[in-house]
Image (tube, rainbow, N blue to C red):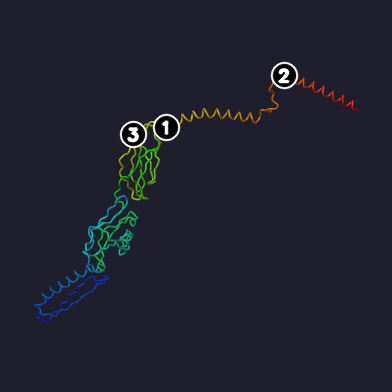
Amino acid sequence: MDDSPALWKTVLVVKSMAVLGREKAFQVKLSLPNPFTRVLEGIWTSFMMWFFYALIPCLFIDGVASLPAPQNLSVNSTNMKHLLTWSPVILPGETVHYSVEYQGEYESLYISWIWIPTSWCTVIEEPKCDVTDDITATVPYKLRVRATSGSQTSAWSTLKHPFNRNSTILTPPRMEVSKDGFHLVIELEDLGPQFEFLVAYWRREPGAKEQTKVVRSRGVPVHLETMDPGATYCVKAQSLVKVIGRHSAFSQAECVEVQEEALPLALALFAFLGFMLILVVVPFSIWKMGQLLRYSCCPVVVLPDTLKITNSPQKLISCRREEVDVCATAVLSSEELFKAWI
């Protein structure tokens, strides 16, 4: 800088980013005597730096940040269920609501200024949000949340690290193993449409081979195998999620024992009674049917009582002879009288 006694012209140019990304240039012309030039230059530079440091944060906040922003954002993900949580904003005597937005991989790379509201967490009171329905691809997702109370709005708080659903924790499925007669049956919990289950089962004996079966039915009993009487069978299962290419550990094995095959006492008693009934009813039915057929085809003729012979045959014959003689005598007498009358 020139130190001559004449008037010096000092030009200070300050460039800063303002709203809408425009550059503004400030030119300040100072025409001051030499003793005050350096002091005023330092004061002016400090003032301009303070002004722009105070202005820049406001350029990146939507609205006035009069509420503290939510803190400690994290995602708890288990079995493909994703829950975003954060520390609540405390405002005595006021109700604080929260809104959650997200960006997928495409938005983050190509349209980073666009954030999408979540399906269920536009205006909520609890400091948590289920984002399962919004995380639909195996890519990094950015999540952010802000608080509102009346006309007051906080700044957005963004999840520190993007969330990818392939980091979810997979747990062994709950299962119920039972027997239906000699059938080995398993029922698995319903973890959602993206889950399949690998079921391993075997007969508990030395050298037994483990068999496996992929089960897609959830909440429905599934038949695994027909068991041998007197044997014990064991079952274990693990969860499979193809969309992320991962699986859980196997569950603890559960075993069922099949009793020796034996007829219950009641069943044996009913069988005996049925056999005896057959022995009695079948012959009687055959006899009765024969009687009916005989009476229908060859009926027996029964004489009336007036035609039945009650006396001995000899007496009957003798009586009839006497009656014949009497009748013959009566006839002859009648003929003789008739002739005499003529």
Q: CA distance from mark 3 to mark 1?
A: 32 Å
**Of the residues shown, which amino acid type is indicated by label 1?**
Ala
**Front one among 152 and 272:** 272
Instruction: Answer left or right for 266 relative to 114.
Output: right
Task: Please determine whether, in this image, residue 279 is positioned above or below residue 157.
Answer: above
Q: Tell me the quarter of the image containing the N terminus.
A: bottom left
Q: Residue at x 29, y 55 (%)?
A: 83
- Residue at screen point 23% across, 74% down: 24
Residue 266 numbered mark, or none = 1
The amino acid beneath tag 3 is Arg
**Nearer to us in this view, 7 or 180:** 180
First in residue order: circle 3 vs circle 1: 3
Residue under the image location 18 percent in, 72 percent down = 51
Kind of residue at disc 2: Lys
Determine the CA span between mark 3 and mark 2: 99 Å
Q: Residue 61, relative to residue 76: is it above or below?
A: below
Give the image location of residue 198, x and y in percent: 36, 43
Percent of width and height locating residue 129? 29, 57
Tag 3, which secondary structure? loop
Q: Nearer the viewer, mark 2 or mark 1?
A: 2
**SS of the residue under disc 2:** helix
Q: Earlier in the sequence, mark 3 or mark 2?
A: 3
* Residue pointed to by mark 3: 204
**283 left or right of 89 in image:** right
Mark before the other along the chain sequence, 2 or 1 = 1
